[in-house]
Amino acid sequence: MAGETPNLLLIDDNAENLESLRQRLAVLMPAEEVEIRTWVPTEDDGPPAEAFEARVDDRTALVITDYDLTTSVKGLFGLSIVGWCQKKSIPVGDFSRGNVANLPKEPNLFELRVPTDDEHGAAFVATTFRGFRSLRSGIEAAPALLTERRSLAAVLSSLLGRSRLESQFAAYMSRLGASNSALLQQLRSFAGEEQPDDEDKIRLLTYVLGHVLCNAILKYPGPILSRHSLCAYIATTLEESEAIEPLFADACYTGPFSAGHSYFWRGDVDRILDGLGGDVDQADLESFADLNRRLVEAALGRPLATHNCDRCGGMKGGFWCPFTVRPVCERADCSVPSSSWIPAGAQLCRVERDFYDEWAPLLGL
């Protein structure tokens, strides 16, 4: 498949909406980069599964589908498309324009949630397509990754040029099998008479590593921080990001799925913070976040804004709660450490205490 033009398939039962998205993507992604295919399902297509099969092939790198396709075909939902894609290890994203409440905001690990407006949706599709293609190109350029007995975490850390982070990435992958039954089925087939060739291995590696990176590592801060979690790490509000980010320009993560976003390597952030040391008084500091905040305030020559927390007056932090989307600190009345709600590798995620106390008993956690 190397050297051949990949394709992506857009599926919607509204031809006008589909064409609008296609046109925006055509501006962002030239024809030599990707072939954009579209499908407006109709009853005349015959069995939907067969119609889908006729529109994807070994070069299909991404599928984007509306959640509710029943306007055109009775009983056809994007959920079926998602399932068919997962069996084939094709990355798939879904969205819902009509009734957004029908579609959970948080996707499964092996599912992608697409913004519903065309501008942001097209940007998301382009970034996601290029993220998976970047990983695939990296695997194709290093054949040893297919022959050496390496863990998935070792492959990913090698592709990102951060081999020392293998153990941290591995923590995010501890429950992959429970996240995708189709993945387990494919692995079982590989263990039997159906021996995988290099193309099968490349497709599966790209599929698994792309989703782990996009939906876990970049979403739940640990070795990589988003703009939100960087501000939390400095114990301040997102409003300070424009002032803070230039200090950490040398820590930027520019790997797969980074286009249009700001991400930072935590190790490089710590190195830069160490360099800001100077004459900062550390005698009264209680945590690493207190120090981070004071170091950045010294570098900026002014106090940082406080975030919205009535427990500490918005002065503490260090961690990010992905549920209440707020900075939290390690105080017992503020947050609880990683639970079954958060990937094990997300060292800088904690659950806000009030939220946890409210929902944990109901969920049996």
Image (cartoon, grey):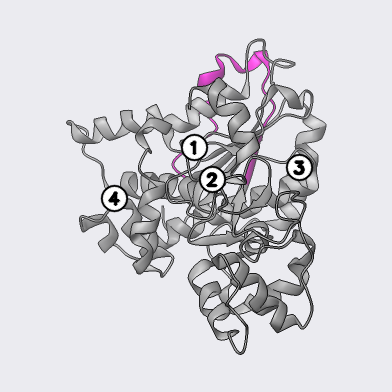
Tell me what residue is drawn at x 71 percent, y 49 percent.
311
- Mark 4 and mark 2 lie on one chain; the one further toward the N terminus is 4
Label 4: element kind: helix
Question: Closer to us: mark 2 or mark 1?
Answer: 2
**2 and 1 marks in contact (CB < 8 Å):** yes
Q: Which residue is mark 1?
A: 110
Task: Tell me: residue 269, above or below residue 256.
Answer: below
* Type of amino acid under label 3: Leu
Residue 82 visible: yes
Residue 223 x %, y %: 48, 61
Q: Residues within 10 Å of mark 2 (few under 14, many from 20)?
A: some
Q: Which residue is mark 3?
A: 21
Q: What is the C-alpha distance between the residues marked 4 and 2?
A: 25 Å
Question: Closer to us: mark 4 or mark 1?
Answer: 1
Question: Closer to us: mark 4 or mark 2?
Answer: 2
Q: Residue furthest top?
A: 74
Q: What is the C-alpha distance between the residues marked 4 and 3?
A: 34 Å
- Mark 3 and mark 2 lie on one chain; the one further toward the N terminus is 3
Q: What is the C-alpha distance between the residues marked 1 and 3?
A: 23 Å
Residue 194, quarter of the rendered image: top left
* Type of amino acid under label 1: Phe
Q: Which residue is mark 4?
A: 198
Residue 106 visible: no
Tell me what residue is drawn at x 20 percent, y 34 percent.
191
Q: Which residue is mark 2?
A: 215
Q: Which mark is residue 88?
A: none
Is residue 281 toward the left or the right of residue 141 in the image?
right
Front in this rendered view, residue 262 or 38: 262
